[in-house]
Every structure is written in structure tokens, then in C-alpha cells.
Image (cartoon, grey):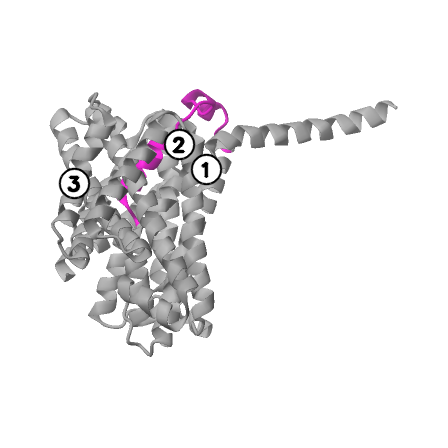
């Protein structure tokens, strides 16, 4: 009897510890799905479809490499927020002199403005495809949807917002996946060849840089470091259970960013299939893609594409809205009504759409501006994550710091070279 009791108790304790571990991990799961929305925004849709239409699977390796960097970057952003209980902008406000902090705030606000521009364009295109709505009206509705999401988050409705983000991620993936299946003829045997790093002329280099610029987004770094903070995840708990925290963050980031990577690769494959179906006449234009689907495949495929584009635009505009809120509160610590603040920062995007600036021009301009904010966000992240005083037990290992620094340098060089090549 004694032997039985002795051998069974440790098993029971182990099961309880495992169950308790999962319960403690639950509050830390979800934020990566919000950040992942930034990786399937309209800029990604446009660049990935164009890559598939013009170069086939040639640039799949760029999407894979950029997605791996995104996983590393967002994992560090989440660690930073949990270890310190502060966002990256808040840490900058405490660490740097006032003049330096103001410069960082200005560049971050410019990045948010440019991000809003691209996301508003995507939502406007989606509404035009789905409802035939004028661009001006779609801009107003997109602003209303973004402010509604901000209100949801501001009232403490964290889980519903994360669930909506996950639903949007799945909706975009489902729409692109359905079109990928019905279009067919994607030449899958060429996919593995696309994993080998190579280019085919200057145009492929420019498009690859565009993919990188559309994938590694500075505002997602600022946002993730803030939204990961919640009840039950205090810095004190993090320092007591660092192994549990690392497991939770790895799971959250791997699943969330993994889904985004799968969607981006599916976009390239869909671009390949539609280009083959049209005999190479379609080269990536979103309006033309909708028309080709309606004509060659059917209304269901065109509808799925329109819903995917609209979901990408509206969900990413909501994420951009939250990022703008994090940036201003973190760098300035000003008590400005959030809706007024967001109306101001969204105004340039709305004005550009209302006056009828060409959509392609807006997308290109936004990506060029965003590219200048990439190196700032990445190197700020590495600067804090390597500091043991700041991070405690979640500090980066030396190898992680070197890998992150190298990846950040490559991404920064690629992003900053994009304006020169354009």
C-alpha cells in the first residue's frame, strides 16, 4: 500500500503542475495574432501577388526569410513588454534625453501615418471591389471601423479584440486559399526551387525589397511590446517563472506569425496561378485580379478575393490605430483623448483618398516612408533586450543578440535601399 501511494503521488503532482502551467500560460497567448495582422496588410497583398504574377516562385525565399526575422523580432518585443511592464516607447522616454526622445517620437509618428495610408488604401480597394463604393466613402467607413476597434481596446476588451484579429487573419487566409484552389495551375514543382536565394534582374531585387519592407513593420514592434502586458503577467511573475514565460511567448509568436507566413506564401502561389490562367496578361493589379477571377473562375472566387482584401485593410487599420495610441502615450505621456489623437493621425490618409490621389502612388509612397523607420525600431529593440538590468532573466543570450543585430542590419540595409532603387 505504501509503495502504491509513493509512486502515484508524483504523477498526480506532475499533472497538476502541467495543468497549472498551461493555465498560467493562457493570459500570455493572443497578442501575437494582433501583431500578425501587420504582416498580412494590403502592402503584403500587393507585393506578394505581384511577385507571383511577374516572377513565379522566384521570391518565395524572401517571404520565408522575412517571416523568420519577424518571428525573432516579435518574440523580443513580447519579452521586452513582459519583463519590464512597459512598452518600447515608454522605455525610450525613461532612458533617453528629452531631445532624443522627441526625435524618436517624430519618426515613429511618421511611420504610423504612412502605415495608416497603406492600410486605408487597402480597405478602400476592398470596399470598392465588394460594394462598388466610391473611394471617398470607403475612407470614412474605414476610419469609423478603426475608431470602433480602438474603443473596444480602450474599454479593456482585450480578448474580443484578439479574437477579432485572429478571425481576420483566418478570413484573409481562407479567401486567398479558396482562390488558390479554384484557380489551380500553380506549378507546385517549382515551389522548392523558390527556396534557393537568387534574383532575376533589377526588378526582382526591387520587388524583394518591397516584400521585406511590407513584412517587417516598425509599428508592430511598438504595439506588441504594449499589448502583451495584462493582469497575471506582472514583471514579478515573469522573473519568478522565466521558463514558463519563454514557452508561452514562443508558442504564441510561432503560431501567430506562422499563420501570417503561410498566408503570404499562399498569396505568391495564387499570383502564380492567376498569371498562368491569364497567359501572363495579369501582372498583379488588385482590381484586375478581381475582374479576372469573376470572368474566368466565377463570382464566388471574386467575392472571396474582395473579402480577403477588405479584411486585410480594415483589420490592419485597426492595428495601426492601436499602434499610434501606443506611440503617442509612450513617447510623450500626454493625456490626449484617444479618438481625437487618432483622427489627427488618420487625417493625412483620409485627405489623400478624398482628393483622389492615385492608389498605386499612395502605396509606393507609404512603403518608402515606412522603410526609414525599420532600422530605428529594430535597433532600439536589440539595445534594450541585451541589457540584463532591464530584462532580468529574459535577457537575450549573446548569440541571440548577435543574430538579431545581424538580421536587423540586413533588413535595415534592404529597407533603406528601397527608396534609392525606386
* Quarter residue 402 falls in: top left
Secondary structure found at label 1: helix
Of residue 354 and residue 269, the one placed in the foreground of this image is 354
- Seen at 31% across and 77% down, the residue is 280
* Quarter residue 307 falls in: bottom left
* Quarter residue 299 falls in: bottom left
Magenta region: 216-243
Residue count near mark 1 (Cα–Cα under 10 Å), binned few <14, some 14–19, many ≥20? many
The alpha-carbon separation of the residues under discs 3 and 2 comes to 24 Å
Secondary structure found at label 2: loop
Name the image quarter holding the N terminus: top right
Left or right for 255, reference 106: right
Of residue 358 and residue 404, the one placed in the foreground of this image is 358
Examine the structure image and report whether residue 307 is included in the region drawn in magenta: no
Comes first in the chain, label 1 or label 3: 3
Q: What residue did someone put label 3 on?
A: 110
Where in the figure is residue 178, as x and y percent of width and height? 46, 61
Is label 2 in contact with label 1 (beta carbons under 8 Å)? yes
- Seen at 24% across and 47% down, the residue is 138
Tell me, for residue 128, which label it has, or none: none
Secondary structure found at label 3: helix
- Seen at 16% across and 39% down, the residue is 347
Q: What residue did someone put label 1 on?
A: 249
Q: What residue did someone put label 2 on?
A: 228
| Residue 23 at least partly seen | yes
Of residue 239 and residue 402, the one placed in the foreground of this image is 239
Left or right for 256, reference 349: right
Amino acid at each position: 500500500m505504501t509503495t502504491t501511494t509513493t509512486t502515484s503521488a508524483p504523477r498526480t503532482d506532475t499533472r497538476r503542475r502541467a495543468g497549472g502551467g498551461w493555465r498560467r500560460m493562457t493570459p500570455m497567448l493572443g497578442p501575437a495574432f494582433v501583431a500578425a495582422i501587420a504582416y498580412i496588410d494590403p502592402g503584403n497583398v500587393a507585393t506578394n501577388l505581384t511577385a507571383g504574377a511577374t516572377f513565379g516562385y522566384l521570391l518565395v525565399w524572401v517571404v520565408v526569410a522575412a517571416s523568420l526575422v519577424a518571428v525573432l523580432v516579435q518574440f523580443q518585443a513580447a519579452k521586452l513588454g513582459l519583463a519590464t511592464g512597459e512598452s518600447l516607447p515608454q522605455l525610450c522616454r525613461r532612458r533617453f534625453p528629452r531631445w532624443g526622445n522627441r526625435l524618436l517620437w517624430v519618426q515613429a509618428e511618421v511611420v504610423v501615418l504612412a502605415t495608416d495610408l497603406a492600410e486605408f488604401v487597402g480597405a478602400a480597394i476592398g470596399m470598392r471591389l465588394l460594394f462598388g463604393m466610391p473611394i471617398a466613402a470607403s475612407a470614412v467607413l474605414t476610419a469609423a471601423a478603426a475608431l470602433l476597434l480602438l474603443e473596444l481596446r480602450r474599454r479593456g476588451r482585450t480578448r474580443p479584440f484578439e479574437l477579432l484579429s485572429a478571425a481576420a487573419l483566418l478570413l484573409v487566409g481562407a479567401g486567398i486559399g479558396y482562390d488558390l484552389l479554384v484557380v489551380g495551375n500553380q506549378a507546385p514543382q517549382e515551389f522548392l526551387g523558390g527556396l534557393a536565394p537568387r534574383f532575376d534582374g533589377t526588378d526582382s531585387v526591387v520587388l524583394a525589397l518591397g516584400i521585406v519592407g511590407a513584412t517587417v513593420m516598425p509599428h508592430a514592434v511598438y504595439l506588441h511590446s504594449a499589448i502583451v502586458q495584462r493582469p497575471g503577467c506582472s514583471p514579478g511573475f515573469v522573473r519568478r517563472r522565466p521558463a514558463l514565460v519563454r514557452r508561452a511567448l514562443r508558442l504564441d509568436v510561432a503560431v501567430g506569425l506562422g499563420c501570417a507566413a503561410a498566408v503570404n506564401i499562399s498569396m505568391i502561389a495564387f499570383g502564380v496561378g492567376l498569371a498562368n490562367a491569364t497567359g501572363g496578361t495579369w501582372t498583379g493589379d488588385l482590381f484586375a485580379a478581381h475582374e479576372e477571377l469573376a470572368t474566368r473562375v466565377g463570382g464566388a472566387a471574386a467575392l472571396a478575393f474582395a473579402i480577403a482584401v477588405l479584411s486585410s485593410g480594415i483589420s490592419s487599420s485597426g492595428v495601426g490605430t492601436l499602434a499610434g495610441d501606443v506611440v503617442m502615450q509612450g513617447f510623450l505621456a500626454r493625456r490626449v483623448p484617444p479618438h481625437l489623437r487618432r483622427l489627427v493621425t488618420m487625417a493625412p490618409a483620409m485627405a489623400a483618398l478624398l482628393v483622389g490621389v492615385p492608389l498605386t502612388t499612395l502605396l509606393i509612397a507609404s512603403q518608402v516612408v515606412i522603410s526609414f523607420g525599420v532600422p530605428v525600431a529594430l535597433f532600439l529593440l536589440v539595445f534594450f533586450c541585451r541589457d540584463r538590468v532591464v530584462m532580468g532573466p529574459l535577457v537575450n543570450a549573446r548569440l541571440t543578440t548577435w543574430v538579431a543585430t545581424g538580421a536587423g542590419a540586413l533588413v535595415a540595409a534592404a529597407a533603406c535601399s528601397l527608396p534609392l532603387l525606386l
